[in-house]
Structure formats: structure tokens, C-alpha cells
């Protein structure tokens, strides 16, 4: 598992509930559980700092890293998506973004495409992206972020044929492939859930092991944010496995939550003040996802 991606997972699932800040020594200790060495952790957090996801802070001879506004907003959005058990009701309209971004700023075009996929848009053609979800706010923020007002047009409209909405879906997303990925997740993690639940009940699974398994679970499930657009029920095929996978994830996560959080807190408090940003937070609150 990529060190940088694991750090994002830890910030989203744990650290953001504790003031968004962690001592580098605690971060290294946590990631040692997954086989990441000190040098890899320092290199990854430095890269995240340069990219604007985290910011460094010195206290005496200790270095701390905390989420920037950009990092906090992205993780909050992702956390809301991963624990949304069911899609919102469809209003029957489509959001359509068209752009003609010049070749000389193709790097912005490439970044925009990644952001659109992450938000849940599908590509009908190279420069035409659609979604049935209410993503007006996200689109506005992307246009402002990349300063591309003169190159884009955005529509909220009804589809008037001559084909069906299902045809639009099949043209823009490969739902069969996504469903297969959900099936693979269910097959693998159903077995792991039963085994680990038994171990926890018998007291034969340590807090550290629960921490590792919970983090791996979040790390794996978060990948669906980059492939599943979160379509409304009306537009999903029969035998859709997304809801089953979400339910399995939630139950497994809850089973691992308490002992995993105990381990995190035991490491975190070694170099940080153990104060939660939100006192209503408990071990069953939302995790997060990010690329």
C-alpha cells in the first residue's frame, strides 16, 4: 500500500477527529504497523506538504503536520460519500459539463478530468461529462479553482431522447465492471469479517491488529469512490451489489472500531495532546477517501 495514500487514510479516519494535527513521530509509529519505514513516511508527508494537503508546524524540536483547509474540505466530502448507504432520490435531470480547454494548458485539463471522475461524472465524449447527481456546487468550485470560466459551459437539463436514460449510463460508465469489483470485495471481506468477528469475541485479536485491519478495510473500500459514480436507484441495473458492499463495510468497520481506536489513541497521545475536535465523535463515525 502506497505510503502517501495510507497517510491520507489515517488523517481521514482518525487524525481529523483529533484537531487535524499529529506529531511526525506518532505518524511514523502508526505506519510502522503496515511496514512503512521512517524515511518513506517523511518523504510522503513532505510531498503532501508541497501539494497543499498538509502544513508543517514546529514546537520545540518536534515537527507536527495538520490538514490545510483544502485537505479538510476534501476529506469531509469524501467521508460523507463513503458512508452514504443509499443514493439520493433522482430529480430526473442531468448535469452536463462541456469544455474546450486549449492544448497549452492541457495539464489543467488533465487535472480537471481527474476531479470530475472523483466527483462522479461520466464521460460521454472527450469534452462532454454528465451526471444525474446534484453536483452544481462541485462544478462551480472546480471552475473557480482552475480559472477556466471562458472554456466551459454547464447545463442542468432533462434528456428528451431519442434513447433511454439507461443508454446514457452505459455510454458513460462501465457498470458491469464496477459491479464485478463490488462482488470481489464482498467475496473477500465477507470471509474476513466472520473470521475477525470471531477473534474479537474470543479476545484473540489485539488492538494493534484491529487498527491494521480497519485501516486496510477503509483503504480498500475507498477505491470505489474513483469508479462508482453513486447513481440513483432508478438508473442502476438489477442485481446491483453496491448496497450489499456498503452494508458489509459498515458492519465490519463497526466490529473493528473500538479496539482500533484504543490503539490509535495509545500511539497518538505519546506526542500529542489527546483532545478530540468533536466530543460527539466516536469510533463509528465516518472514515474518508482520497487519491
Image: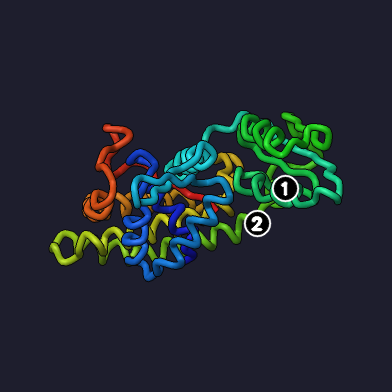
Residue for point 44% across, 62% down: 41
**Of 31 and 26, which appears nearest the observer?**
26
Q: Position of residue 6 (x, y in %)?
A: 44, 59
Q: Is residue 5 left or right of residue 28?
A: right
Tell me the element at label 2.
loop
**Of 259 and 263, which appears nearest the observer?**
263
Position above or below: 171 against 202 = above
- Image quarter of residue 163: top right
Q: Which residue is denoted by mark 1 in the rendering?
A: 167
Tell me the element at label 1.
helix
The mark closer to the camera, 1 or 2, is 2
Q: Earlier in the sequence, mark 1 or mark 2?
A: 1
Position above or below: 15 against 203 = above
Position above or below: 40 against 116 = below
Q: Which residue is denoted by mark 2 in the rendering?
A: 174
> From where the camera sits, is residue 222 visible?
yes
Q: Is residue 75 left or right of residue 234?
A: left
Tag 1–tag 2 contact (CB < 8 Å)? no
Q: Position of residue 214 (x, y in %)?
A: 33, 57
- Image quarter of residue 259: bottom left
Q: CA distance from mark 1 to mark 2?
A: 11 Å
Q: Position of residue 71 (x, y in %)?
A: 51, 42
**Of 273 and 287, which appears nearest the observer?**
273
Residue for point 71% across, 35% down: 143
Q: Is residue 187 left or right of residue 78?
A: left
Label 1 neighbourhood size at 10 Å, few (<14), some (14-19), many (20+)?
Answer: few
Position above or below: 140 against 81 = above
Residue for point 28% across, 46% down: 272
Amino acid at each position: 500500500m502506497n505510503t502517501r495514500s495510507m497517510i491520507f487514510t489515517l488523517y481521514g479516519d482518525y487524525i481529523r477527529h483529533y484537531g487535524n494535527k499529529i506529531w511526525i513521530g506518532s505518524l511514523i509509529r502508526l505506519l510502522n504497523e503496515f511496514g512503512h519505514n521512517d524515511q518513506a513516511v517523511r518523504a510522503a508527508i513532505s510531498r503532501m506538504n508541497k501539494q497543499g494537503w498538509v502544513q508543517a508546524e514546529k514546537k520545540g524540536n518536534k515537527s507536527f503536520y495538520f490538514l490545510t483547509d483544502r485537505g479538510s474540505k476534501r476529506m469531509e466530502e469524501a467521508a460523507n460519500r463513503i458512508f452514504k448507504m443509499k443514493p439520493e432520490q433522482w430529480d430526473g435531470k442531468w448535469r452536463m459539463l462541456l469544455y474546450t480547454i486549449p492544448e497549452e494548458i492541457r495539464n489543467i485539463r488533465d487535472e480537471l478530468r481527474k476531479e470530475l471522475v472523483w466527483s462522479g461524472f461520466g464521460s460521454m465524449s472527450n469534452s462532454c461529462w454528465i451526471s444525474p447527481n446534484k453536483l452544481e456546487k462541485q462544478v462551480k468550485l472546480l471552475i473557480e479553482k482552475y480559472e477556466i470560466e471562458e472554456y466551459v459551459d454547464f447545463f442542468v437539463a432533462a434528456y428528451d431522447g431519442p434513447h433511454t436514460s439507461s443508454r446514457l449510463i452505459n455510454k458513460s460508465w462501465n457498470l458491469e465492471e464496477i459491479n464485478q469489483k463490488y462482488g470481489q470485495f464482498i467475496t473477500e471481506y465477507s470471509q474476513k469479517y466472520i473470521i475477525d468477528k470471531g477473534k474479537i469475541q474470543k479476545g484473540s485479536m489485539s488492538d494493534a491488529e484491529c487498527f491494521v485491519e480497519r485501516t486496510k478495510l477503509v483503504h480498500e473500500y475507498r477505491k470505489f469512490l474513483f469508479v462508482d459514480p453513486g447513481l440513483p436507484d432508478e438508473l442502476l441495473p438489477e442485481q446491483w451489489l453496491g448496497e450489499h458492499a456498503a452494508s458489509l463495510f459498515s458492519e465490519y468497520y463497526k466490529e473493528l472500531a473500538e479496539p482500533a481506536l484504543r490503539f490509535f489513541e495509545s500511539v497518538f497521545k505519546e506526542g500529542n495532546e489527546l483532545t478530540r475536535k468533536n466530543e460527539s465523535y466516536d469510533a463509528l463515525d465516518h472514515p474518508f477517501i482520497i487519491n
